[in-house]
Image (cartoon, helix red, strand yellow):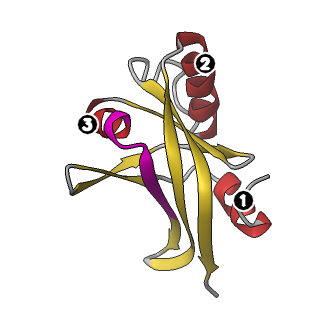
Amino acid sequence: MTNVPPEAERLLESEPLMAHLGTCTEGRPHVAPVWYRYADGVVEIVTTGRKLANIRENPRVALSIQKDDAGHTQWMVSLLGTATVVDDESETTAARRRINEKYDAESDAYAENTLVRIEVGSATYQTYD
């Protein structure tokens, strides 16, 4: 059962927006943009470098997704969850394909990255008129 309200799920699945992934190691936060795919309470990203190293050290993460129109916020969703690094090339390839389809990217975009699945523990959202 997902901890994400149905309206927030609809927003997360609605369009290819950038998410900001927050990780923390050694008492220092690190926030970086990522592409993502959300389905059934799980966020998939593919990443490498510092983000991946941070997740391996501390799997507690945050994601923030926001849609703006001409500088005015339309909606925002914040997620807290636990990340799992998936060191399986076939699963990573399938997830990369799903994410790249969402963002209409080349099939080999981010070919060197590793799959991370984030089980959402809690979610908050806000829509603005």
Residue 97: where, in percent of width, then height?
A: 61, 24
Residue 104: where, in percent of width, then height?
A: 58, 35
For marks 3 and 2, the one nearer the N-term is 3
- Main SS of residues in magenta: strand
The outermost residue toward the bottom is: 129
Q: Residue at x 70, y 60 (%)?
A: 3
Q: Residue at x 25, y 36 (%)?
A: 50
- Residue at disc 1, secondary structure: helix
Q: Tell me the CA gap for discs 3 and 1.
A: 28 Å
Residue 83: where, in percent of width, then height?
A: 49, 41
Mark 1 Cα shell of 10 Å, populated few (<14), some (14-19), many (≥20): some
Q: Which residue is mark 1?
A: 9
- Tell which of 65 and 115 is nearer to you: 115
In which quadrant is the C terminus drawn?
bottom right
- Contact between marks 3 and 1 (CB within 8 A): the answer is no
Magenta stretch in the rendered image:
56-65
- The numbered mark at residue 50 is 3
For marks 2 and 1, the one nearer the N-term is 1
- Residue at disc 3, secondary structure: helix
65 sits to left or right of 42: left
Q: Which residue is mark 2?
A: 91
